Image (spheres, rainbow, N blue to C red):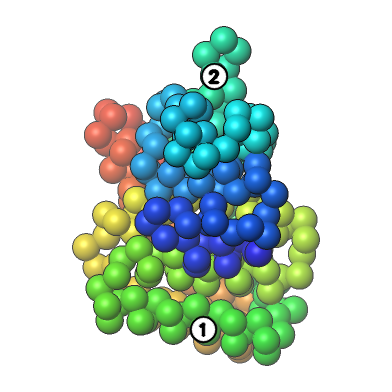
Amino acid sequence: MSLAEMFLTMGEGGESFADSRLPLPDRIAGYIRHQIIHDLMKPGEPIRERAIAEQLKVSRTPMRDALKILSVEGLVDLIPNRGAVVVDNSLDDITDMLSVYCELDVLGGEAACRKGSETDFLKIERYQEIMEEAAAEQNRLKYFHANQAFHLAIIAASRNRTLIEIHSNLSLRLHRVRYLSILAQQKWLSRADEHHALIKALRARDTVQMAALQRAHFAVAWRLVDDWSRSAGQPAGKR
């Protein structure tokens, strides 16, 4: 299952645990990951290993293996004699990651313009259709997952395995920020034109326009970071 498909099939309860195609530690990690990136487990919050193991009816060994996976992904800190806690990134950490993520998105979009196939473009357009369905249903969660899948499909069309791998890792670490930015938007339904413009640039293989559109598309996430900075009494996030 690709990262885009994983996001698209996630429900509010983290149904990815039921995916028997994955090894048990990966399924447990998927469940905990869902709780973290959807802000159901807060930054700095301890991971209640015993309670989760009982809830999922699993033993402690695959639970510990799952936490190691999440530690490598940068979502969990493993602290000696204290157990696992959700990573609490500073505003500077988030700003640094978002800066790199934005540039990777631009790089991937430019490569997708050059290397993307008709099959890639049709898949991206399908995710756009799902976003429009979600908008019609006023289903913000469905919209968000389709939005994530849309952008990850563009990266996949780059055919650059190194870029895809690094982008995927950062996507997981920044998922909470982007999730909260969508929830904070009052005009989240009005962004359809931006996605249509991205598809148009892709099909025209216009790398310059694609880069400009992608940078503009990140304005919402940056505004959220700036709001957090102001509420913490810090300067606005660096770019």
The crowding category of the residue bearing disc 1, from other C-alpha atoms within 10 Å (few below 14, some 14 to 19, many at least 20), is some
Query: For residue 107, which quarter of the picture?
Result: bottom right
Q: Position of residue 238 (x, y in %)?
A: 45, 40
Q: Is residue 108 left or right of residue 79?
A: right
Q: Nearer the viewer, residue 63 or 67?
A: 63
Give, as a three-letter code, the residue at label 1.
Arg
Give above or below for 41 relative to 205. Answer: above
Residue that badge 2 annotates: 83
Report the label total. 2
Is residue 112 visible to the viewer in this orientation of the structure? Answer: yes
Q: Residue at x 54, y 19 (%)?
A: 83
Q: Residue at x 25, y 73 (%)?
A: 138
Give above or below for 130 relative to 168. Answer: below
Residue that badge 1 annotates: 126
The quarter of the rendered structure image containing the N terminus is bottom right
- Of helix, strand and loop, which one carries label 1? helix
* Numbered circle sitting on residue 202: none
Q: Gap in Å between the C-alphas at discs 1 and 2?
A: 42 Å
Q: Residue at x 68, y 74 (%)?
A: 157
Q: Is residue 94 left or right of residue 143?
A: right
